[in-house]
Image: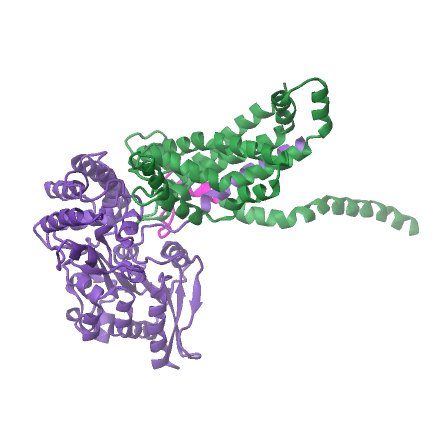
Chain colours: A green, B purple
Amino acid sequence: MNVSNVKNNAPRTKSRRNWKEKLTPFLFISPHLFFFIIFLAYPTFYGLYISFHSWNFFTDMNFVGLQNYANILWNTDSIFFDYFWAAFRATLIFVVLSVPFLIIIPLFIALGINARPFGHNFFRALFYAPSLLSVVTVVLIWIWLLDTNAGLVNYYIGWLGFDNIPWLTRAPWVWISLVVMTIWWTIGTNMILFLAGLGEIPDHLYEAAKIDGANRIQQFFNVTLPGLKGPLVFVMIMTTIASFNVMAQPQLATNGGPGYETRVLILYIYEVGFTGGNPRAGLAAAMSVVLGLMLLCISLVQFKLMTKEK
Amino acid sequence: MKSYKLLMAFMLSAAMFVAAGCSEPTQEDPGNAGGDGDDTTTETPGDVGEAEITLEFWNGFTGPDGEDIAKIIADFNEKYEGEIVIRSQTMPWANFYDQYRTVVTAGEAPDIAIMHLDQIAGYARYDLLTPLDELSADIGLVAKDFIPEVWNAGVYEGQRFGIPLDVHPLTLFYNVDLLEAAGYSEPPTTYDELLEMSLAIQEATDAWGIAMPVFWPSNMIFYTSLMSHGGESVSEDGLTPLYNSPEGHEALQKMVDLVYKHEVSPSDVQADGEVTLFRQGNSAFHLNGIWMIAGFEQQDGLNFATAPVPAFGDQEAVWAGSHNFVLPKQQDEDPDRLEAAMKFIQFVSENSLQWAKAGQVPATYTVLESEEFKALEHQYNASQQNFVFPPSTPFYGDAWGPTGPAVDEAMLGQLTPEEALERAAREGEANAREAAE
């Protein structure tokens, strides 16, 4: 009896422990997993599902296969084809104009502050402060500053003897305005990331470089930049994604105009999906999927290029 | 390095799919100038307890106008204490339609809601609103009590779905001091007078005559000018844009001419730039919706008045919008609740003077012709116009919408009026046909 009991019990305890061991990590991630599934995984797959349907929220979903994708990707007769690619062009312009500045300017500010000049804490707070404002506040401040006829910027430009600049009504000025307000608003975040990265670079590397006779510029390219590789990859990918997802600045400052000049993808997706008497959720979802896939490809390419070992 | 890659992968997927979801207040709503709160507030105005019937009332009056409607509801709740109580939910208009769609799809629609006139057909098309013909007849609401244009605009395919609360037309604001400086005491009534007075004011003062906006509300002004020239917006069924006509070209050309030919308006007036110039006393005339009254009244040192929009063509006609009561369709229709809802609508209609003070034109003649309303000078002057509402069709927004960017580009001189309207009509037709499929 006893013997058989022991025999029977042994594997059971083992399997129970096994089972527990397997479950433990799930318990740790379960709170996050729960929210991840509800707010990310489910909406993502539901969005994919909607994109194959014609739906306006009221009627039943109508399966249309690839028609939504056709209308934006290869059906050149469709009005949405023109709108989508115009919006894509607008987004691309914004990304190309904004990303380099959003990386280079915070990098140099971080370098300056990291050198610990007099008042560096004050400047760190100062450069970070705009990031705390909501986008509506930021855009309103800049609209007032950049007002063609009553704004401060054009007042000084007029004082210098130049004509008014149509900052918020004409290309290419609209792009400059949108990029400038975005830079002002978001440099703080990237600056903090760079500062953290700079703090991680050991001092002895600089000392060694000095002993080898490297000047400041050589130190920057041979010690600082390689040391910042991790944060740089992160900042570059996150900034690119954020710039692709721009919406509120053109929506509030230029209303997507003049014409369709600054109607960026997310703004257009919002208009298609949620405004007007006839929302087109399927089409909007299809555009989101296409944008998501594009971002995935671009990020992967960036990641591969940046982390390639020499 | 590996954990870093994992982190990256997660951050990537998170950022990509999260960022698409935000919605900011848009400029599309003309009915509410001061709505900047993001939250939905629920309240039961008045000092009342439980009642036999509790009705949910949804609206988008988040600005100062919210207080005025709350006062009316409080009076109603006190009058019908124990019988009917209204619980109001207020949210910004941008969220209103989003949330409304969600609850309606889930079968949990509010009992009463306020909707913009041009939205009604879109909801009526899917059978989401209760027809009100019999209900309003039962309670004694009759056509002759209302301004006919706005009353008729609430009908879609032969059935009434909306009861108008107010009318908010485009109107002319003018700076009394600047007009006096140039020797005028009366506002202009025609385009030529507007032009002549603007030139005289520019001669006598440093101010501009008028500031013509490039962006919104430029296409509301275009609509007004188009109506004044005897043009039409879109066909009755909403499928065919009719604005790309000789009348349309002339209507838009006259707006553009104010900037480039007659030079009585600065060019490149960006979003809200025309409001700033008028507030500062740097432009004598200003075309905007009647909802600007409250804001201008608070502006220090601005001595302004309102008047009907000068006729750009040979007819008097202006763009106007309207807030309408609607009764969303319920899963289980209860005649008692419907009757209670109609009592509320009737009560508000009869007591809309309070509402007029918020800067609106009431829709009923009893209030319109009252001495108290005539004492509200700005609202009264703006009410003395010929309102033209868009045709009641679910496709109006699709067919008319592309005029927005087109008028922008014409006002910048980047496209001629003919090119701009031709493009808009082409896009509008494609849009509407697609929506009707």
What percent of the width, then of the height, locates residue B82? 39, 82
- Tell me which residue sits at (35%, 73%) in the image: B71
In front: B258, or A20? Answer: B258
Q: Tell me if A208 is positioned left or right of A80 in this view.
A: right
Q: Could one spot residue A87 in this view of the protein? A: no
What percent of the width, then of the height, locates residue B107? 40, 60
What percent of the width, then of the height, locates residue A193? 60, 37
| Residue B90 falls within the magenta-colored stretch | no
Marker count (numbered): 0
Over which residues does the magenta segment extend?
A44-66
- Tell me which residue sits at (25%, 62%) in the image: B161
Q: Tell me if B9 is positioned left or right of B68 in this view.
A: right
Examine the rendered structure and indicate whether residue B333 appears above or below residue A142: below
- Tell me which residue sits at (19%, 61%) in the image: B382
| Residue A47 falls within the magenta-colored stretch | yes
- Tell me which residue sits at (34%, 32%) in the image: A172
Q: Tell me if B436 is positioned left or right of B18 in this view.
A: left
